[in-house]
Amino acid sequence: MPRTISHWINGRLHPAAGARQPVFNPATGEIAAEVGLATEADVDLAVAGAKAAQPAWAATPPLIRARVMFKFRDLLDQQSQRLAAQITEEHGKVLSDALGEVTRGMEVVEFACGIPSLLKGEATAEVGRGIDSFAIRQPLGVVAGITPFNFPAMVPLWMLPVALACGNAFILKPSEKDPSASVILAELLQQSGLPDGVFQVVQGDRIAVERLLAHPDIDAISFVGSTPIAEHIYRTGTAHGKRVQALGGAKNHLIVMPDADLEQAADALMGAGYGSAGERCMAVSVAVAVGPIADPLVERLAPRVRGLKVGPGTDRDADMGPLISQQHRDKVAGYIDAGVAAGAELVVDGRGLSLQGYEGGYYLGGTLFDRVTPEMSIYREEIFGPVLSVVRVPDFETALGLVNDHEFGNGTSIFTRDGDAARDFVQRCRIGMVGVNVPIPVPMAFHSFGGWKRSLFGDHHMHGPEGVRFYTRLKTVTERWPTGIRAGAQFVMPTMG
Ligand code: NAD
């Protein structure tokens, strides 16, 4: 009998009574566990517990809330190997990459440890005679996070440390494809001293999500996942009067200018294109080669792509592991078929890879296309696999136009030695996160993460200052303490004249 991954409600595992579905080990194709799928009643129970626990947590001084975060940070550090091993088992990414994800998540906890400073408001003395005004930020109440499969620890950690430190209760609905990390996070939060009910996990699929979106006691929704679902979450959540931030898919371009350091650019494209088998929202999937650099760039990339070592995530020599599922592997292979049919030049073909001893795993080799054009589906759509497309353009303006005309606007990068071109690119690109000679410009925890265009629905990016704003609402107070003065009723708009 495979183990069952349950919900975490009111400080303990809550048995999954309803339907279940298998969780696979993508390296072998075997069933690793089963996950319970929450019913509406399970969601309601979690929300009721969170609603009951939140007021006392909100009334807890930020300094005490921060101390819980300090403890949580230490426990995450101590348990990072266990967490990473669990991620590798269910997601498939190589262990070193899983550890990197835990570290990037832990950095958001470190940011949240500063919540007493981050919640400091503004004050003005004497806005009128004897009148002072101050503004404070207060928690929203019960908030929910719905997260994707590709970062089962880091993406929840983009949200929950900030939400909790601000004084909210948080309900996590992780991806049903790799749900175990969520329960480890719940255990560690409890060991850190977080009161029961303030952090809940409901496992599940669409049914759980729809209930969260409609539930009258959920005040805000944070979502990360694919664009069609992000748009649905935004529309439905806001229609129910909730604050929503919904981060979607991406198609990130890396511009290689003719004066770029070729070796650096080729290395950057390898790591950003094929790391985590391309299953990153900040993966670079398009290399835009400007002018004469295209031939030497492809010459440098091809042997590197052929030399990629694909293996189970537990193999310390592997550069990348399997894809998340059989269905997704077939979908990515289908994109390679479509690219060939559309006339792109297939320089390295990753289809048909089989690993001895791991024949049931969902592997696909690194794939490189050259002479890709903007009307091809491999250019327009997010593939989310180890497939890099080279697009050749004559000049900088055409490269910039490609970036700006694409429906997605998550990340981009330019490789050049020319500061003028780089500055121009930074100023004029319509993208949320931009790198200059940096391939994956993921902002650090104390900055904020988010894209533009159809990569983000809503007003706020995640973590950093934007996260604090998202998880709090502003209250502005104007006060005076008059003694013995009676001005009588005033019927005009008060002014300072
Ligand atoms: P997904 O959209 O399939 O699933 C995300 C979450 O939504 C999961 O929790 C899932 O259970 C839920 N969900 C799925 N279908 C639903 C439906 N019909 N109704 C309600 N809920 C539903 O995404 P995924 O495949 O898990 O993750 C990969 C996607 O996430 C990629 O598109 C990637 O670019 C994106 N992503 C974006 C960012 C970012 O910061 N912009 C970060 C990571 C991943």
Image: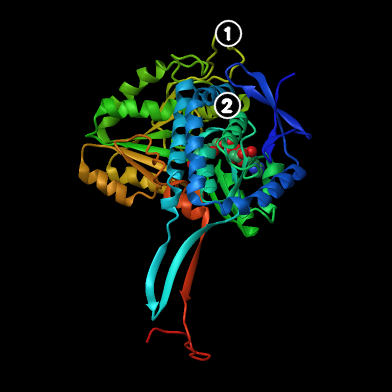
Which disc, if any, is residue 71?
Answer: none
101 or 309: nearer the eye? Answer: 101
Q: Is residue 463 left or right of residue 225?
A: left
Q: Where residue 38 appears, x then y in whole percent?
A: 73, 39
Q: Which residue is mark 2?
A: 324
The residue shown at (42%, 29%) is 273
Seen at 70% across and 44% down, the residue is 46
The response on whether ligand 1 sits within 8 Å of label 2 is yes
Quadrant assignment, res 28:
top right
| Residue type for callout 1 | Gly
Rendering coords of residue 297 (x, y %): 30, 27
**Quarter of the render that holds ligand 1:** top right
> Which residue is drawn at the image coordinates 26% and 31% (left, top)?
293
Quadrant housing the C terminus: bottom left
Q: Which residue occupies 51% across, 31% down? A: 75
Horizontal side of residue 376 vs 21, given as left or right: left
Tell me the SS state at disc 1. Answer: loop
Inspect this view and state whether residue 483 appears: yes
Q: Is residue 204 visible?
A: no
Image coords of residue 406 (percent x, y):
44, 45
What residue is disc 1 on? 357
Residue type at the position of mark 2? Ile
